Image (tube, helix red, strand yellow):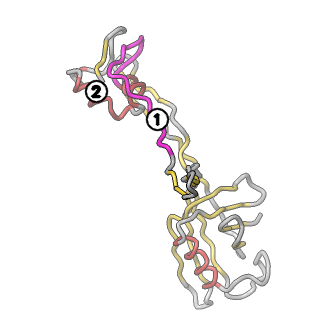
Amino acid sequence: MDFYLSYNNNEEQLRLPVIPGEFELTQRHNNTVININSLGEINLIGKKGLASISLSSFFPAQEYYFCKYTGFPNPYECVKRIQKWRDSGKPIRLIITETPINYAMTIENFTFSEQDGTRDVYFTLELREYVFTKQVKPTQITTSNGTKVIVPPTKRETKPVSSTQKAQKGDNMYTIAKKATGSMSNANAIAKTNKVDQHKGMDLIKGTVVLI
């Protein structure tokens, strides 16, 4: 098993000379638990959250017998490399061989210290998954008189939110808020608009017209 950190499509790479004794990858899921009077607690399945991992090891100042390879950078060269990546505003990539872990990640926290007079540098590196999003670039066009003009990307049209919603069987203010606005966090505001007493429950009768 080896731990590789790389930057800018493998333009720069750092293989950890001493692998961490353990690691734990956390993969959250954004589920929401709500309480409905007629049912009790229910769990609404959401989208997956970002994975995170914390790695702790040390950069050796000498070639110990247990190092994964020889000729590695000195400890503070490793530190400077990670600091440069952190400050670049770009993600890095973590690969742990012999596992499925191969993630683009951001550096959330990086701490290092010397402890025992050997000049080895102990570190903890906290990483969080980075998701690439597609960005629309401006377009350059040439007019009839030869002038080059930069045209900004066209704004995506958004679908207007319906002003009312008709409750179906099993609906409540939370499900209506999710359908109409995309977020259940708006349920209390919608209940207030419709003069629904939140303390008496958020359930709705089928056919009720809810003002958004």
Q: Which residue is depicted at the point 32% across and 11% down? A: 208
- The location of residue 153, given as percent across then percent down, is 51, 48
Q: Is residue 130 magenta?
A: no
**Inter-mark Cα distance, 2 to 1:** 25 Å
- The location of residue 69, given as percent across then percent down, is 79, 78
Using the image, tell me which numbered label, if any, was put on residue 157: 1
Quadrant assignment, res 185: top left
- The location of residue 62, given as percent across then percent down, is 71, 88
Quadrant assignment, res 81: bottom right
Magenta stretch, overall SS: loop
Q: Residues within 10 Å of mark 1 (few under 14, many from 20)?
A: few
Q: Which residue is depicted at the point 23% across and 21% down? A: 194
- Dividing the image into 4 quarters, which one contains the C terminus? top left
Kind of residue sitting beneath label 2? Ile
**Which SS class for mark 2?**
helix
Q: Nearer the viewer, residue 64 or 8?
A: 8
Using the image, tell me which numbered label, if any, was put on residue 190: 2
Q: Residues within 10 Å of mark 2 (few under 14, many from 20)?
A: some
Report whether residue 131 is seen.
Answer: no
Left or right relative to 45: residue 6 = right
Farthest residue to the top: give it. Answer: 207
Asked whether disc 2 touches disc 1, contact meaning CB atoms under 8 Å apart, the reply is no
- The location of residue 211, given as percent across then percent down, is 28, 20
Kind of residue sitting beneath label 1? Glu
Left or right relative to 207: residue 137 = right
Q: Which residues are magenta?
A: 154-173
Q: Which residue is depicted at the point 57% across and 87% down? A: 116
Q: Which residue is depicted at the point 78% across and 75% down? A: 68
Asked if residue 148 is positioned above or below residue 45 in the image, the reply reads: below
Of labels 2 and 1, earlier in sequence is 1
- Dividing the image into 4 quarters, which one contains the N terminus? bottom right
